[in-house]
Image: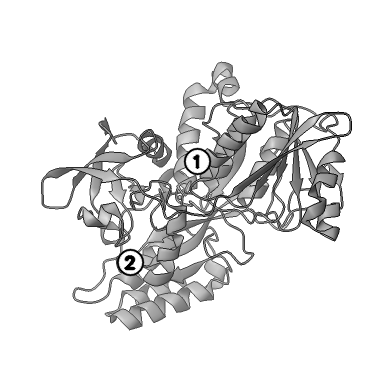
């Protein structure tokens, strides 16, 4: 949004990335596709040329590539040529998805109506992907490239993708939009929100220790479209049951919607700095959580070698903001963000568009997050039936953190208000292009 981050063919994507990361529909970008031929190859070239993180393009002759992809090509020739170029970049996370595989990303749809919103360079909010055929957006006739001028009575002028998502999520059942297609007037539409029933990513239990302390345990399996709402409900429930401390288990969590990590970090800390994003132009920008504080209970985060991407973002943010100790083993080490950009044929280009670092400035890619305490969990060795044993053995010691990172309001009070706000909006644009900041451990959506 995006993010992303929100990400996927029907999220606030391309989940859109840095200052100019959110792309206009390919028909509006620089290289023009020959008439009566497939535009997909040209769309792919333009998106890579504009947003791809590695500006050396892995040594590929980029001018020759442009000439090849700009030639008249049939649908099959365009797809084959574009796929060859994508593979030549040598990036395991960048890939071309046909429409059928793109549809699988719908479980990350955080809007619930099937629209993928992007911000053009001119500041217009556009539909950046073909709406899924079974979505309310498709049934209402919304198409790729349409402009959304108003959401729930609010003008989209000046909105970031995160702003739009906030407005959409205020009503749990419907979204009112005003849409304008090229060459036609505006239409007012009411879209009903519906989700593909993604699995509940949260599992909880309340464990009573030998000294009578109640420890609330929360297992977060992935960052999908429901993770923020489910996490907040879980925290509220455990606190209502008398939990005096919390364990957040991110072991085996390969990531997902970056917006989920941003939001959940805010549940435990007051609008914290969550990460720094660096785009293809080398610009480094901070990204803060917008969510309100939910819990101040002592917190410990569990991680392992399969904790990746958005999970690493969350673990590092909670640690660097002096909010939680991180316990377990070094994490996977995926510190790059992918944007998912819709194509006119209903497919999508997933491309690496940014890298990120922790609030403390440490790189994550290929390095991972180092825990405060190395720990082998009994439940990893003897099975999940020993989970309570691990929870009861947890010590909520003081946090190894020299100084909390600055909060957004701290920067503003120091005189950087407008600059900080501009940087946040710019970074949000980048993060929303990547609804999935997902790791490469068997997950379809990155």
Q: Is residue 357 shown to the viewer in this render?
A: no
Along the polypeptide, which appears first: circle 1 or circle 2?
A: 2
Residue 94 placed where, x, y %? 52, 66
Name which residue lies at 26% across and 45% down: 191
Depth order, front residue of 155/134: 134
Query: Which image quadrant: the C terminus?
Result: bottom right
Depth order, front residue of 333/416: 333
Circle 2 residue: 346
Left/right placement of residue 416 relative to residue 321 reads: left
Depth order, front residue of 101/24: 101
Residue 78 placed where, x, y %? 34, 78
Residue 370 placed where, x, y %? 79, 48
**Up-down relation of residue 290 to residue 259 (above or below):** above
| Label disc, if present, on residue 51 of the rendered structure | none
> Quick one: which residue is furthest to the top in this view?
413
| Label disc, if present, on residue 427 of the rendered structure | 1
For the residues labelled 1 and 2, the Cα–Cα distance comes to 27 Å
**Labels 1, 2: front one:** 2
Helix, strand or loop at mark 2: loop
Total marks shown come to: 2
> Quick one: which residue is furthest to the left in this view?
184
Left/right placement of residue 56 relative to residue 190 reads: right
Residue 373 placed where, x, y %? 86, 43
Label 1 crowd bin: few (<14), some (14–19), many (20+), radius 10 Å: many
Helix, strand or loop at mark 1: helix
Q: Is residue 403 shown to the viewer in this render?
A: yes
């Amino acid at each position: 949004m995006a993010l992303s981050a929100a990400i996927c063919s029907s999220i606030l994507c391309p989940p859109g990335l840095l200052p100019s990361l959110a792309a206009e529909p390919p028909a509006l970008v620089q290289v023009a596709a020959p008439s009566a031929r497939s535009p997909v190859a040209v769309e792919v070239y333009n998106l890579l040329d504009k947003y791809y993180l590695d500006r050396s393009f892995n040594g590929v002759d980029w001018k020759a590539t442009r000439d090849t992809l700009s030639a008249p090509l049939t649908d099959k020739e365009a797809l084959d040529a574009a796929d060859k170029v994508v593979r030549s970049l040598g990036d395991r996370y960048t890939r071309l998805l046909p429409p059928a595989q793109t549809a699988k990303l719908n479980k990350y749809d955080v809007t619930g109506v099937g629209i993928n919103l992007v911000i053009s360079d001119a500041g217009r909010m556009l539909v950046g992907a073909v709406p899924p055929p079974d979505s309310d957006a498709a049934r209402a006739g919304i198409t790729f490239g349409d402009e959304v001028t108003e959401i729930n009575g609010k003008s989209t002028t000046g909105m970031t993708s995160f702003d739009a998502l906030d407005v959409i999520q205020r009503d749990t059942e419907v979204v009112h939009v005003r849409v304008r297609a090229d060459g036609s007037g505006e239409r007012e539409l009411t879209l009903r929100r519906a989700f593909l029933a993604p699995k509940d990513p949260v599992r909880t239990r309340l464990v009573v220790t030998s000294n009578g302390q109640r420890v609330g345990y929360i297992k977060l399996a992935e960052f999908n479209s429901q993770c923020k709402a489910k996490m907040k409900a879980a925290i509220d429930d455990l606190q209502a049951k008398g939990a005096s401390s919390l364990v957040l288990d991110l072991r085996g969590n390969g990531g997902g919607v970056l917006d989920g990590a941003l939001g959940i970090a805010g549940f435990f800390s007051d609008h914290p700095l969550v990460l720094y994003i660096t785009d293809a132009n080398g610009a480094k920008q901070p990204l803060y959580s917008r969510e309100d504080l939910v819990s101040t209970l002592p917190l410990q985060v569990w991680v392992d070698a399969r904790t990746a991407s958005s999970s690493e973002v969350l673990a590092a943010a909670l640690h660097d903001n002096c909010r939680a100790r991180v316990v377990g083993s070094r994490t996977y080490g995926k510190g790059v963000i992918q944007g998912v950009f819709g194509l006119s044929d209903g497919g999508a280009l997933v491309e690496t568009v940014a890298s990120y670092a922790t609030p403390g400035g440490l790189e994550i890619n290929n390095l991972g997050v180092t825990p405060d305490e190395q720990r082998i969990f009994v439940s990893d060795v003897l099975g999940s039936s020993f989970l309570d044993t691990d929870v009861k053995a947890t010590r909520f010691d003081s946090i190894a953190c020299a100084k909390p990172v600055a909060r957004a309001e701290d920067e503003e009070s120091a005189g950087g208000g407008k600059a900080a706000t501009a940087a946040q909006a710019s970074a949000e644009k980048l993060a929303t292009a990547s609804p999935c900041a997902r790791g490469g451990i068997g997950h379809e959506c990155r």
